[in-house]
């Protein structure tokens, strides 16, 4: 945090969610700009800390999506680094944690693709080498929602692991050979590791699953 403050990019913000709820702002409730100009004194517990983001778009390479361009100004505006409740915000915590753990590759669902520009922006500002990013297609319900516990998606049946893995491999474009039909999950995973090529995901779309259930 001190490094970012020394760069003159961080400012105190007194806006609350209620203040920004009715404004045409990015999804995280970015500050409309008045606090950036006000040069408020930071008081822990009384206001938050935000970082100034550039208007120029950020371009980054994703191993599945290819070259990707996003505008931080449009995505999040000046996003929060340190919250009013004295907790470091997600993006800064993730960036520092990944750096300290020596993370070199990040593989996650494409629903988090729009979080990547904020994190790369912070990595660059802190002098960190960004990891390699890969954002995978999702499993979604017919109405477009990602399958998740919060939406009632059930856990995978551990007794049907082989069938489920075979179904997933087929649907991402890596169908197992006939000799592995009905094989155990560990056999399918071992084959998939040896046969894997991330390029197969470049043309893969979200997998639509009805009733939160893998078809039989």
Image (cartoon, rainbow, N blue to C red):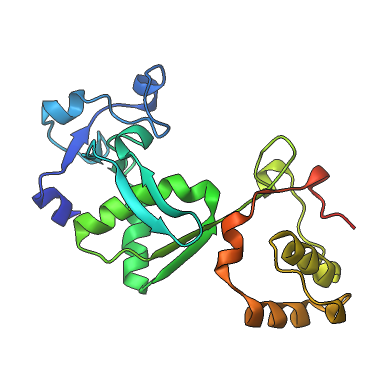
Residue 84 in the image: x percent, y percent? 31, 38
As displayed, is residue 51 above or below residue 3? above
In this picture, is 48 found above or below 67?
above
Q: Which residue: 38% across, 36% down?
A: 75
Say if 180 sits above or below 39 in the image. Answer: below
Task: Residue 23: give x, y in percent of width and height.
Answer: 37, 18
Residue 16 found in image quarter? top left
Q: Nearer the viewer, residue 46 or 3?
A: 3
Q: Is residue 57 visible?
A: yes
Image check: 92 left or right of 149? left
Q: Quadrant of residue 33?
A: top left
Residue 64: x percent and y percent?
A: 51, 59
- Horizontal side of residue 197 vs 162, given as left or right: left
Seen from this angle, which residue lies furthest top? 22
Q: Nearer the viewer, residue 188 or 10?
A: 188
Q: Quadrant of residue 49?
A: top left
Q: Residue at x 76, y 78 (%)?
A: 188
Task: Locate the N terminus by quadrant.
Answer: bottom left
Which residue shows up at 12% across the image and 34% down it?
Answer: 41
- Pick the quarter of the image with the C terminus: bottom right
Does the image show residue 89?
Answer: no
Q: Position of residue 202 (x, y in %)?
A: 56, 58
In the shown orientation, is residue 188 left or right of residue 198?
right
């Amino acid at each position: 945090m001190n490094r970012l403050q020394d760069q003159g990019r961080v400012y105190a913000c007194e806006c609350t969610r209620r203040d920004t709820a009715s404004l045409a702002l990015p999804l995280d409730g970015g500050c409309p700009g008045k606090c950036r100009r006000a040069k408020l004194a930071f008081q822990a517990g009384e206001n938050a800390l935000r970082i100034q983001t550039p208007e120029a778009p950020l371009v980054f390479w994703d191993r599945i999506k290819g070259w990707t361009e996003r505008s931080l100004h449009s995505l999040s505006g000046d996003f929060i680094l340190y919250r009013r409740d004295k907790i470091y915000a997600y993006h800064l915590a993730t960036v520092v944690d990944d750096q300290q753990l020596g993370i070199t590759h990040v593989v996650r669902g494409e629903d988090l693709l729009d979080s990547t520009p904020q994190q790369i922006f912070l990595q660059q500002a802190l002098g960190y080498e960004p990891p390699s990013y890969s954002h995978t297609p999702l499993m979604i319900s017919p109405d477009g929602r990602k399958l998740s516990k919060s939406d009632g998606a059930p856990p995978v049946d551990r007794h049907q692991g082989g069938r489920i893995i075979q179904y997933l491999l087929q649907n991402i474009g890596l169908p197992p050979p006939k000799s592995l039909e009905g094989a155990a999950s560990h056999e399918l995973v071992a084959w998939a590791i040896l046969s894997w090529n991330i390029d197969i995901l470049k043309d893969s779309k979200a997998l639509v699953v009805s009733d939160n259930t893998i078809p039989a």
